[in-house]
Image: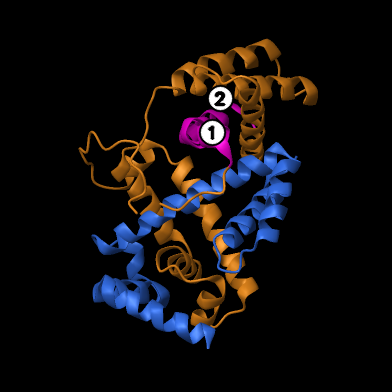
Chain colours: A blue, B orange
Amino acid sequence: MDSQPIEEIAARWVARRYDDAWTDADQVRLEEWLQAATAHRISYIRLETAWSEAARLQALGAGAPAGGRQNGVAAGEIGARQEDGPHDAGKRGGAAHIGGRG
Amino acid sequence: MVTLAMNGPLDHWFATEILVHEAALMRYLRRVWPNAADVSELRQEAYVRVYEGAAKSRPGSPKSFLFTTARNLMVDRMRRERIVSIDYTQDVDSLNVLVDEISPEQRLSARQELRCLGEAFDQLSDVVREVIWLRRVEGLSQREAAQRLGIPEGTLESHLCRGLRSLANAVFGNSPEQVARGGARESDKGTEHGQPAD
């Protein structure tokens, strides 16, 4: 039994489960997949718990600067967004939101 | 906090009573199992056995149950695969000793956990880090995040999956010693088992 492909699939389920495009039909398929094998279920629980924990990254971004965030373009952007403060970050997110729909 | 899709008390039990011991479990498996490439697979198999065992009857001591299960799993494998180095019984004995040696209770404090998460996040590639940030912190959908970054949605999802798996390994797999080595120490007693701050 190789856990890697299962973990990969479980990660995709988590990615989609927490996306706007998630439907009731997806939920049914997820539940079928979880029922199919305990290995599916435990991989899913593990990654979903990590997804939940990752919400705490916000607290880190707002706090002391971390080393890696100074590297690279994307990292710099994230840092800049944080320095702008939460309200501004929210506004930008909102703008992208509207743009995405239009 | 988001509502998780997990069903029922058994899934919750598994997350709060078993996954929290992953760092100790990984340390144990790496110490005693000769082939490092098998360790993730052994972990998964131990988890499956623990989950199925707990479905029938919830163990009184989850941690002992996890380690005993992992040990039995390795014994089974040794028999099956005949990884009998020189003295099989001695191998099995070494499994017993090391369980006790490695098992002292050392959960991370909430701040240590947060630091683990931050360090793991910093180690991700730039694009993966940005994807995680946009999806998880800014709350963008896959489509919105893909548009923001100018990449296809499928690519974005792959980045997200890679990042999520790395973060999971960091969140569950890091030991207190590893964290202590990584930075300053904190005395934040009373904040153990903290919930995500949202």
Spot occupied by residue B145 in the image (x, y as percentages of width and height): 51, 75
Alpha carbon of mark 2 to alpha carbon of mark 1: how far? 18 Å
Q: As displayed, is residue B71 above or below residue A51? A: above
The reply to whether callout 2 and callout 1 are in contact (CB within 8 Å) is no
**Circle 2 residue:** B66
Identify the chain of the residue marked 2, using the numbered disc in the image.
Answer: B
Q: Nearer the viewer, mark 2 or mark 1?
A: 1
Up/down of A89 relative to B33, above or below:
below
Q: Which chain's residue wears label 1?
A: B
- Mark 2: amino acid: Leu
Pick the residue in front: A100 or B101.
A100
Answer above or below: position of B115 versus A64: above
Q: Is residue A18 magenta?
A: no
Question: Local crowd at mark 2 within 10 Å, few (<14), some, or many (≥20)?
Answer: many
For the record, the magenta segment spans B7-34
In the structure shown, which secondary structural element does the residue marked by tag 2 occupy? helix
For disc 1, the marked residue is B9
- Residue drawn 57% across the image and 44% down it: B6
Q: Earlier in the sequence, mark 2 or mark 1?
A: 1
